[in-house]
Amino acid sequence: MSESSLRESLKTWQPPSHWQRLTAIDAHTAGEPLRVIVSGWPEMPGDTILDRRRHARMHLDPLRQTLLWEPRGHREMYGCILTPPVNPGSDLGVLFMHNEGYSTMCGHGIIAIAKVALQTGLLPVHEPETRLYIDTPAGTVTVHAAVSQGRIGTIRFENVPSFVVDLDAVIEVPEWGDVTFDLAFGGAYYLYVDANQFNLRCTPDEYTDLVDIAMSIKEAFIVQKEIRHPGSNDLSFLYGVLFIAPPQQPHHHSRNVCVFADGQVDRSPTGTGISGRLAIHHAREEIGIDQAIVVESLIGTTFTGRIKTLTQFGGRAAVIPEIAGTAHITGRHEFLIDPDDPLRHGFLI
């Protein structure tokens, strides 16, 4: 068969009509992937994004595994489903998903979604800045995308109210003894741990140690402590452990490595994690309103964070963080699910 006839055969081939088909746009923000499902995902009923999150957990989880786990994805794959908005004036809704389930907010995801929605024409573009409102399980976030000659540049978003729960708390971890941590909410709950406690620099060669230590800390916390979100029980869980280390570049503020879900490691500096950190730094009087900090990731990419304003949430002092970064589209996919495939729902090793 000639090359031209082979190409023509591949162009005209159609999968059997009983196979399920889904399409996605893949992107990354500061190195962290996002698979944006744009068609084929079943409708999720519910008046709120949290309602839709519950429906997905109860009825659609095999499909999440299919799209994120091997052989179509991998342990570190991250994804989202676009949904109609739930609040008047919002442009769209989003449900985030990872190797273990469904998260409540995602900073790198918001930046990537804005890039995908504007780059592909899903939403209209306005120069020099396009503003979007995106409904997430944790609340509505406001997005500002810089646009110049049709090109999407830096994207920044104002996150949900972020607040501190504990400072300099201590937990006993069987493998490590007493570990000091801060606990804060930035769209999800994180334990913030000084990496110096474990002689870690938060570099790629420490990947396995970072995961092992973080999961030990997370498991100990879940057994010994309880989290109660002031607004919703659906948000009342520990999402990840975030290590903080000195930066590799002297003009940067610090370095983050977040281990979340089932030992998944964020390649970006973690936008929701920086949001909680901003609340911590403000509570300690270490930064003020509109004072920017540049935070590195495991691979050296950066986000810029600042406090836009102060607020109150659930009787707690809180901040409205702003996180800025860039995203890039990496692929366009059509996924096919053969009902006779014994591995159609994916697997993890």
Image: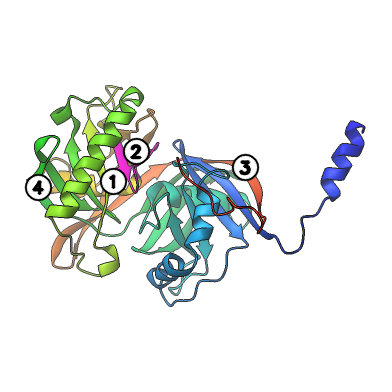
Q: Quote the CA–CA distance across marks 3 and 2.
A: 22 Å
For the N terminus, the image quarter is top right
Q: Which mark is residue 273?
A: 1
Q: Quote the CA–CA distance across marks 4 and 1.
A: 15 Å
Q: Which mark is residue 269?
A: 2
Quadrant position of residue 160: bottom left
Q: Marks 4 and 3: CB-CB under 8 Å?
A: no
From this view, report whether residue 36 is shown above or below residue 254. Answer: below
> Magenta residues, as a range?
255-270
- Can you see residue 232? no
Q: Residues within 10 Å of mark 1 (few under 14, many from 20)?
A: many
Residue 256 lies in the magenta-colored region = yes
Q: Nearer the viewer, residue 340 or 242?
A: 340
Q: Which residue is mark 3?
A: 331
From this view, report whether residue 128 is shown above or below residue 175. Answer: below
Quadrant position of residue 140: bottom left
Q: Which residue is mark 4?
A: 167
* Amino acid identity at mark 3: Gly
Q: Measured from the top left, where is residue 131 in percent x and y?
A: 47, 57
